[in-house]
Image (tube, rainbow, N blue to C red):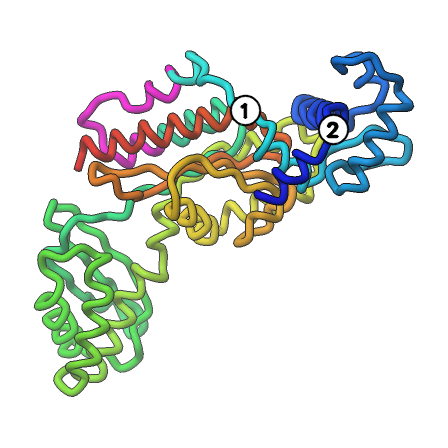
Amino acid sequence: MTEQRSLLSDLNDRSREVFRRVVEGYLESGGPVGSRTLTRLMNEKVSAATIRNVMQDLELLGLLGSPHISAGRVPTQQGLRMFVDGLLEVRDLETSDRALIDATVGDNGTDVGAILDRVGAALSGATRGASLVLAPKSETAIKHIEFVALGQDRALVVLVFADGHVENRIFNPPPGQTHSSMREAANFLNALIEGRTLSDVRGVIQREITHRRQEIDSLARSLVESGMAVWQDGGDRHERLIVRGRANLIEGAEDIDLDRIRELFDDLERKRDIAEFLELAEEGEGVRIFIGSENKLFSLTGSSLVVSPYMNADRKIVGAVGVIGPTRLNYGRIVPIVDYTAQLVGRVISDRS
């Protein structure tokens, strides 16, 4: 970011204005911006030839690109990053957008999951992108665990939480399991987990298995490890992620690369990868913008992600909300929407803590 700001400060006023107007024109239209268009927009009266020379200089700096011979210019990923970091003017949240997001909260008795689902739908509707809502991790204490054999190669692990809700998942247990080993595994876990949250028990269980390796049967030990891994590897992050508004990504399909959209849909189906990426937002407060290949964990090379974490009553970051769309997102409008939505979700989570 420092390099981008340094490069921006090195531009003279004319170059900076040409660059800004090219980017703003691209974000508005999605297409290249030509020199003749800019002659009508510039603050000072300059010729099209002068503007073309400036655009060539900006292209040499890696800030602009030319998609076709003799066409106008579009910002590169580096140019978009510099614009977002140094020139972006974030608008005030529009009243209609605020009302749309506020309406998702509804009745205070509504389940948090249902509220987050409505938040995702409202966010995609307001931004015309695909919305991502990373739900908070469950911090409810565990009351009981049970293993149930369903066949030779299938079993059910059941978790009962202190607040009364029950979760169960089918998994493939290690071979050779017996009713006795399943009972031993459940007894071992229940002695450790009662009163602890799911995130608390993972480290505890592994330490106890290591220290008490001789006390627990090898079959029961392998069942404990594979059964608890169902939550760690088999969908914990996956189930925390709500994706809404995929259809928005193909509106105006004649103007976009359908192969890129198909790749984006594939990425959205691999929810666990995106959930891991959104958890990066938990490393710091505020709205963050990832452009193109800055999305390290998945292949959104032609897309941008605007994301913000939200906090619980203890000011601990517990989840995130975001919007995915083409790189020509209206960042100035979407940033305050994502920011406000994150704050609203944080208040909802805090009120229900």
Q: Which residues fall within the magenta stretch?
A: 99-117
Camera-side mark, 2 or 1: 2
Q: At x 72% / y 24%, what residue is drawn?
A: 13
Q: At x 32% / y 61%, what residue is drawn?
A: 232
Instruction: Residue under label 2, please give it.
Output: 12
Q: Residue 140: give x, y in percent of width and height.
A: 17, 48
**Depth order, front residue of 240/304:** 304
Instruction: Residue under label 1, please give it.
Output: 332
Q: At x 53% / y 37%, what residue is drawn?
A: 324
Q: Amino acid at mark 1?
A: Gly
Q: Residue 174: give x, y in percent of width and height.
A: 30, 77
Q: Secondary structure at mark 2?
A: loop
Is 111 in the magenta? yes
Q: Around disc 1, counting alpha carbons within 10 Å, would you say few (fewer than 14), some (14 to 19), or many (20 or more)?
A: some
Q: Secondary structure at mark 1?
A: helix
Q: Quadrant of residue 93?
A: top left
Picture quarter with the N terminus = top right
Q: At x 58% / y 48%, what residue is drawn?
A: 294
Q: Tell me if 99 is positioned left or right of 203 in this view.
A: right
